[in-house]
Amino acid sequence: MNQQNVSPPSHEPMDDEISLFELLDVLIRKKYLILGITVLVSLFALLYSLQLPRIYRAAIYFRPPTINDIGMLNAGALGNSGIDGQSGDVREILEIEPSKVYRDYLTHLQSRQIRFQVFEEVFPGVGEGDIEKRRAFDGLNASLVLYGKEDKKKDVVHEYLTLEGGEPEKIALYLNLLAERVNDFTVRALITDLEL
């Protein structure tokens, strides 16, 4: 028979412990290397960030109109209805609901035609030819994003429009003019509907 020598397990302590003092000693000895690498990486990150183009974001927020906000439109609806306003329920007479005005406004906000008119007004010298101008407009239009934020307390969705670009004054002007032009267009469209 074959005999194998099996040694009994030893009860000697294992020598795989790490001393904190040894680690601290290594860190102190390598402090200039650690500091140098940290400074080098920080300088690289700083130089890289300075090379990036500055991008600014402008946002404009919308809220649904109230009945008071569209009172003049509804006053026009009363005048066109031939009713003297003395009798009957006013709720039955109103032709324009705030939700319809808001839906129409958001629909007109998506209009490429209105967006392009405002683009030509704010950025008149962009692009020498029609193709370059359309390309610049398409780039701007692609960075124009409409978001919805739900307000659960009031059961309403508030919309906001954002635009990113390198010229903060112009992108803010573009958003404000766009909102103004869409508002004007929406009011004119509603008044035209009432006159029919």
Image (cartoon, grey):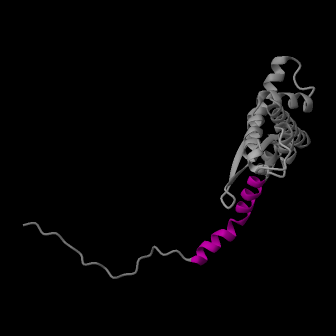
Instruction: Please tell me which residue is depicted at 60% across the width and 72% down the height of the picture.
Output: 23
Magenta stretch holds residue 77: no
Q: In which quarter of the image is the N terminus?
A: bottom left
- Region rendered in magenta: 20-42
Q: Quadrant of residue 93?
A: top right
Give the left or right position of residue 33, taking residue 16 as reference: right
Q: Is residue 180 visible?
A: yes
Task: Return the residue found at the far front.
Answer: 87
Image height of 192 relative to 163, above or below: above
**Res. 52 image quadrant:** top right
Q: Nearer the viewer, residue 95 or 131?
A: 95
Image quarter in which the C terminus is found? top right
* Residue 25 falls within the magenta-colored stretch: yes
Up the image or down, 61 lies above or below 22; here it is above
Q: Whole-percent x and y of residue 101?
A: 77, 42
Q: Where is residue 45 in the image (x, y as percent from the top left)?
A: 76, 50
Q: Position of residue 17 (x, y in %)?
A: 48, 75
